[in-house]
Image: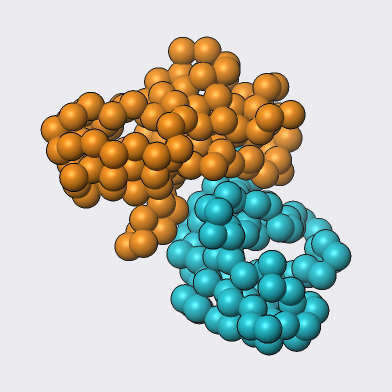
Chain colours: A orange, B cyan
Amino acid sequence: DAGVIQSPRHEVTEMGQEVTLRCKPISGHNSLFWYRQTMMRGLELLIYFNNNVPIDDSGMPEDRFSAKMPNASFSTLKIQPSEPRDSAVYFCASSFRAGLKSPLHFGNGTRLTVT
Amino acid sequence: AQTVTQSQPEMSVQEAETVTLSCTYDTSENNYYLFWYKQPPSRQMILVIRQEAYKQQNATENRFSVNFQKAAKSFSLKISDSQLGDTAMYFCAFMRSNNNDMRFGAGTRLTVKP
């Protein structure tokens, strides 16, 4: 099993540019989560999907952030336009919801730097 | 809303000694799950140990064990025989039984000294 795959591993962009982060969950997992990690706020849940349907997006900071999951094997988190305060590590995680005690399996994260 | 509190931003321990990391949480739920994750400098998030709230027995995984006090809403992690490779950020996490979104504490940075 390749685990949760995120790309890119690092992203450096200029303020105002569009940023797209990508995630491939573990095959067979039907829940997918996007987290943001910063020194100030720690790990924040941005949004999560069950069976490709967004369940809770209350953690999405602003309308500049959007997430999609067009199929069970792919999700994107988009920031448009990006701002320096969006700089953080963004994690994608997946789990198998039917086993509610199933822990989250994390990708290696994307470090985003907005200059 | 559930909150998870880790009151120790940083801790250190000598190699081979034992260290305990604290975690408290706030919930009105009776059934839930608790986890400890480790994040080494590589930033990978690694599951260390998990505990179901309905189980009274404390979970153990090799050198890692928890002290789960449900009434006190406390879930501490004990690392025995600390190794240099245990140096990492440790996050306590909470998950309700009917909803699988996971909420994390702020983390404790543990340094194991040779």
Tell me the residue at 34%/48% (across/down). Answer: A88
> Could you say which quadrant of the image residue B19 lies in?
bottom right
Q: Residue furthest left?
A: A16
Query: Above or below — where is B29 with respect to A94?
Result: below
**Percent of width and height locating residue B94:** 58, 55
**Percent of width and height locating residue A13:** 24, 36
> Could you say which quadrant of the image residue A19 lies in?
top left
**Percent of width and height locating residue A2:** 68, 30
Looking at the figure, which quarter contains the C terminus of chain B?
Answer: bottom right
Pick whichever, B25 or B79, lies toward us.
Answer: B79
Pick whichever, A6 or B74, lies toward us.
Answer: A6
Tell me the residue at 21%/49% (across/down). Answer: A85
Tell me the residue at 45%/37% (across/down). Answer: A9
**Percent of width and height locating residue A61:** 27, 42
Query: Above or below — where is B44 with respect to A18?
Result: below
For residue A17, side relative to residue A93 (left or right): left
Q: Is residue A80 visible?
A: yes
For residue A35, side relative to residue B55 (left or right): left
For residue A68, side relative to residue A19 (left or right): right
